[in-house]
Amino acid sequence: MFREMRKKQREITEEESIEILNNGEYGILATIGENGYTYATPLSYVYYNDAIYFHCAVEGSKLDNIKYNEKVSFCVVGKTKVLPDKFSTEYESAIVFGRATIIEKEEKIEILTALIEKYSPDFKKEGLEYIERAAGATSVVKIGIDRITGKARR
């Protein structure tokens, strides 16, 4: 179903890939639309309970594409360092392949709270108040993971 990594010497373990997901600031979600074009967009996310979650508006290209085709990929790039004298780069990255679904109710609030804890830990009280006000105008999407792959040159 999935190709083998070409440069096997760069492949990292699933645990290392999950660490990149846990530490990442943002990721790139790739979807495909009815017009046959891919759509890749950077977004904030949280790796939580062995899944990727993100929030977005209640309508837009991401959601239209997910309704069209639930299969997505999500990429996070970790630490990088250009090596000019070697014409190369040190890097680490993780890619998730999975199926995206919109979540609701308690799970939605739980994930919005997890996003506050990740990105605004010093403002949890204010974040929870914000969730109460804005949850109705917010969608939360879960990417159930079919495969995680990671690669690094360190």
Image (spheres, rainbow, N blue to C red):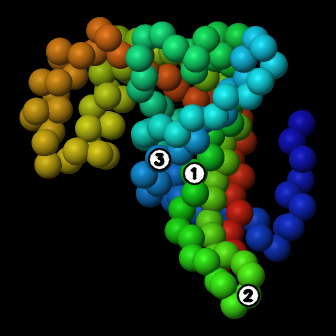
Compare marks 2 and 1 and give the one earlier in the sequence. 1
- At a point 62% along the width and 46% down the height, the residue shown is 75
Q: Is 107 drawn above or below residue 136 in the view shown?
A: below
Q: Secondary structure at mark 2?
A: helix
Residue linked to disc 1 = 76
On residue 67, the disc is none
Residue at disc 1, secondary structure: strand
User: Residue 57: percent from the left, percent from the top?
Assistant: 41, 17
Q: CA distance from mark 2 to mark 1?
A: 24 Å
Amino acid of disc 2: Lys
Above-or-below relation of 83 to 63: below
Residue 149 visible in this rendered orientation of the protein = yes
Tell me the residue at 18%/17% (across/down).
132
- State the residue position of label 3: 26
Q: Quadrant of residue 34?
A: top right
Residue 86: numbered disc: 2
